[in-house]
Image: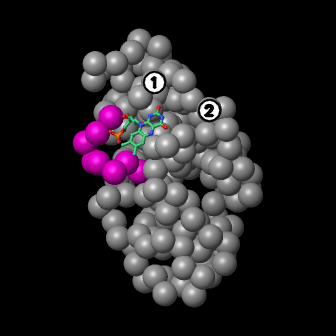
């Protein structure tokens, strides 16, 4: 049950990455870092159709059953780099509908990392609704934070449960 975790932080070795690495250890999931790719903002005239987005999403679809978005909380919302990636999913329902159709068989989940436990309940809405629009199975959202640069026990337990979900076969 391959999972690809898509890290969308403004720094590759920050707090969200610490959480992602802990989940990789527990689940065996693969991690990709959006900072390693050249992915332009959504463009109505598709001038950026030859950047890294289409090959990257095609590889993820080929190799994964589950996409797990991992974003820091920036101003109560997802990061800008993650939003640019989510906006580009539009390409999968317009110029590359074949990719969008193949995503229908996949699962989507969300991992967020903020400065504290508190998070607006609406934070996950854009992801959950996007999963619904793309006819993907929504597997849920785990919110995390660090305390003195370490995983609190409750976060560690949630990551263990998430790892089990990621590796559980569903039809
Ligand atoms: C631009 C910016 C905005 C932030 N806004 C929030 C916020 O609204 N809520 C919150 O809990 N933390 C907020 N934070 C704190 C980060 O979510 C937190 O430090 C997170 O662990 C950073 O992850 P990173 O190291 O991967 O960037 C913000 C941080 C930055 C840099």
Q: Depth check: give the residue in front, 40 or 109.
A: 40
Between 87 and 64, the one nearer to me in the picture: 87
Magenta stretch containing residue 77, yes or no? no
Q: Does ligand 1 reach within 8 Å of label 2's beta carbon?
A: no
**Percent position of residue 74, x then y:** 46, 43
User: Which labelled disc corresponds to residue 116?
Assistant: 1
Q: Which mark is on residue 120?
A: 2
Left or right, residue 49 beside residue 7: right
Any mark on residue 51, and which?
none
Residue placed at 57% from the left, 87% from the top? 45
- Residue at left offset 52%, top offset 57%: 83
Q: Nearer the viewer, residue 63 or 79?
A: 79
Residue 33 visible here: yes
Q: Which residues are magenta?
A: 8-15
Q: Splitting the image into four quadrants, where does ligand 1 fall? A: top left
- Return the x and y of residue 110 as percentages of the image width and height: 55, 40
Q: Residue 165's quadrant in the figure?
A: top right
| Front one among 118 and 36 | 118
């Amino acid at each position: 049950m391959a999972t690809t975790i898509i890290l969308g932080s403004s720094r590759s070795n920050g707090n969200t990455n610490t959480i992602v690495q802990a989940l990789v250890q527990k689940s065996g999931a693969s991690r990709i870092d959006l900072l390693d790719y050249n992915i332009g903002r959504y463009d109505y005239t598709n001038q950026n159709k030859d950047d890294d987005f289409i090959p990257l999403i095609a590889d993820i679809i080929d190799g994964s059953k589950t996409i797990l978005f991992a974003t820091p909380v920036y101003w109560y919302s997802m990061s800008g780099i993650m939003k640019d990636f989510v906006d580009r999913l539009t390409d999968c329902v317009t110029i590359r509908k074949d990719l969008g159709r193949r995503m229908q068989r996949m699962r989507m989940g969300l991992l967020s990392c903020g400065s504290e436990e508190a998070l607006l309940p609406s934070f996950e809405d854009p992801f959950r609704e996007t999963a619904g629009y793309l006819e993907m199975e929504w597997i849920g959202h785990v919110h995390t934070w660090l305390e003195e640069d370490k995983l609190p026990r409750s976060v560690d337990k949630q990551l263990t449960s998430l790892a089990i979900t990621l590796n559980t076969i569903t039809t």
